[in-house]
């Protein structure tokens, strides 16, 4: 495991281009299976989660090759419909092969997925939804942790999601694209990554209405065709770097930024006293003062405040001039950063069975040796190190590489004193 060494106190200045979206790339990569041909995927981020998805594609019989940040996938041939338990254990997004393989082959065997340790994230919504589409399900393994789904034909149906789950919405869409009839999804997730998946599929020949709304309608087609598609920039990476500027009182231009997807993040950063000038595809972020507190910040499904930005805002509010409260309503274990920030001098109390954090801002954090427990939490600790006095070592930094191409490279471009170091750093 690598570590990241940050020497705090350097102001962030300059301009930086944002990478392609992780949360859009993963479902689109799974969706390439539905086309018996070639997909050219531009602006694809070179991150660990993408590499894991490609490995699963190759295990299934597909071929993949890189040309810069363009990924070519040849899914002409599928040799098997089983996703190895080892592959699935590495990341949650592997569950998207459930819908993709069902749609293409009408059969799939897959284990319950792994990934970041931020909560249970059960897949009940996925399974109950696709069951209504004429899909049989069997549970195998010593702990019934392997799912075998099969059908002679996927038949469209009305699907009512109890919760607007992103993964469940995407799996239903993937299952329905090549189905017989029409599938209507009520209370569908509205996240931009769902829209991005639909955009890709429509470009490849799918028929989908209602993109970006809570109601999606998918009319099954006989086949898809080859397509070239460009992924949108990563809204969470952009949000992370905006928050970094707020934490360190910097001045930066973030290019290729999906500002319209970041409305709630931008509003919250303005509340803490950060100035943001937004254009269509870039944002100028500058901050001249210690952050202001926020009375209550609550994470919600899109278009609410994203849970993937909660840890970063926790870092900023730990240095705010007053008391703030964050309530986490998406994942039950997303406050693992609290004990790490406390090592750096933060004053944070957890309440309501760990769902609420009450933060009393301190004027300065100090450097410490801390551990990254998950992707976004790890990035947020890097931000804390940027603002802290002294040196911070963020251990278990491999988790950060799941979503950021090179966080040290990016922040160094803006002037940070930061680098990867050996696993034994302390």
Image: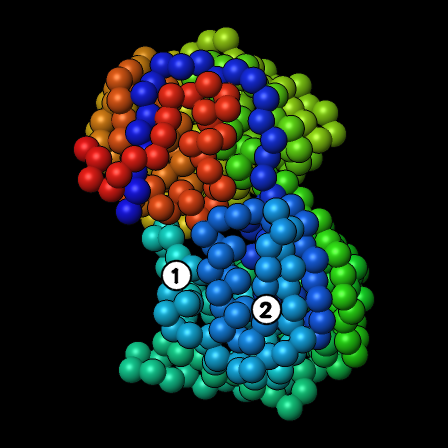
Q: Along the horizontal axis of the image, is 329 left or right of 319?
A: right
Identify the mark nearer the N-term, 2 or 1: 2
Label 2 secondary element: strand
* Among the 4 quarters of the image, the one containing residue 224: bottom right
Query: Is any atom of residue 347 visible in this view?
Result: no
* Depth order, front residue of 255/136: 255
Q: Position of residue 369 (x, y in %)?
A: 22, 31
Work out whether 313 lies above or below 127. Answer: above
* Residue drawn 36% across the image and 39% down it: 378
The answer to whether the residue labelled 2 contacts the one labelled 1, judged by CB atoms less than 8 Å apart, is no
Residue identified by numbered label 1: 90
Crowding around mark 1 (Cα neighbors within 10 Å: few <14, some 14 to 19, many 20+) is some
Q: Position of residue 132 (x, y in %)?
A: 61, 79
Q: Nearer the viewer, mark 2 or mark 1?
A: 2
Work out whether 10 lies above or below 150. Answer: above
* Depth order, front residue of 38/158: 38
* Residue drawn 53% across the image and 75% down it: 60
* Depth order, front residue of 206/53: 53
Crowding around mark 2 (Cα neighbors within 10 Å: few <14, some 14 to 19, many 20+) is some
Label 1 secondary element: loop
* Among the 4 quarters of the image, the one containing residue 7: top left
* Among the 4 quarters of the image, the one containing residue 319: top left
Most extreme residue toward the top is 288
* Depth order, front residue of 264/116: 116
Residue identified by numbered label 2: 63
Q: Position of residue 416 (x, y in %)?
A: 42, 21
* Residue drawn 53% across the image and 62% down it: 54
Q: Position of residue 364 (x, y in %)?
A: 30, 15
* Residue drawn 28% across the image and 47% down it: 1
Work out whether 182 lies above or below 330. Answer: below
Distance Cα–Cα, label 2 vs label 1: 21 Å
């Amino acid at each position: 495991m690598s570590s990241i060494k940050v020497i705090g106190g350097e102001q962030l200045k300059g301009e930086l281009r944002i990478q392609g979206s992780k949360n859009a790339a993963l479902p689109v990569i799974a969706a390439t299976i539905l086309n018996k041909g070639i997909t050219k995927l531009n602006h694809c981020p070179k991150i660990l989660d993408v590499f894991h998805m490609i490995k699963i594609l190759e295990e299934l019989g597909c071929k993949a090759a890189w040309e810069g940040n363009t990924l070519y996938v040849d899914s002409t041939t599928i040799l098997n419909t089983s996703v190895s338990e080892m592959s699935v254990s590495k990341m949650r997004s592997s569950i998207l092969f459930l819908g993709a393989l069902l749609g293409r082959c009408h059969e799939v065997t897959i284990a319950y997925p792994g990934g970041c340790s931020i909560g249970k994230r059960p897949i009940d919504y996925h399974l109950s939804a696709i069951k209504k589409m004429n899909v049989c399900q069997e549970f195998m393994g010593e702990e019934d942790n392997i799912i075998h789904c099969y059908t002679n034909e996927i038949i469209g149906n009305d699907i009512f999601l109890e919760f607007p789950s992103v993964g469940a919405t995407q799996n239903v869409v993937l299952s329905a694209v090549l189905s017989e009839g029409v599938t209507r999804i009520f209370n569908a997730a509205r996240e931009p990554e769902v829209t991005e998946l639909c955009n890709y599929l429509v470009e490849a020949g799918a028929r989908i209405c209602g993109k970006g709304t809570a109601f999606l309608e998918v009319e099954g087609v006989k086949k898809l065709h080859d397509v070239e598609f460009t992924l949108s920039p990563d809204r969470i990476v952009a949000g992370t770097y905006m928050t970094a500027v707020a934490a360190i009182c910097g001045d930066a231009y973030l290019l290729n930024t999906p500002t319209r997807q970041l409305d709630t993040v931008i509003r919250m950063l303005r509340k803490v006293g950060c100035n943001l000038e937004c254009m269509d595809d870039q944002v100028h972020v500058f901050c001249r003062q210690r952050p202001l507190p926020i009375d209550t910040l609550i994470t919600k499904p899109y278009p609410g405040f994203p849970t993937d930005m909660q840890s970063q805002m926790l870092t900023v509010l730990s240095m705010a001039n007053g008391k703030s409260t964050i309530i986490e309503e998406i994942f039950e274990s997303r406050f693992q950063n609290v004990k790490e920030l406390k090592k750096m001098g933060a004053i944070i109390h957890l309440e309501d069975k760990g769902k609420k954090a009450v933060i009393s801002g301190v004027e300065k954090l100090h450097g410490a040796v801390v551990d990254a427990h998950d992707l976004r939490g790890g990035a947020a600790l890097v931000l804390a190190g940027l603002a802290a006095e002294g040196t911070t070592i963020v251990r278990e930094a491999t988790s950060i590489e799941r979503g950021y191409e090179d966080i040290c490279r990016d922040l160094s471009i803006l002037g940070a004193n930061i680098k990867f170091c050996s696993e034994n750093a302390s």
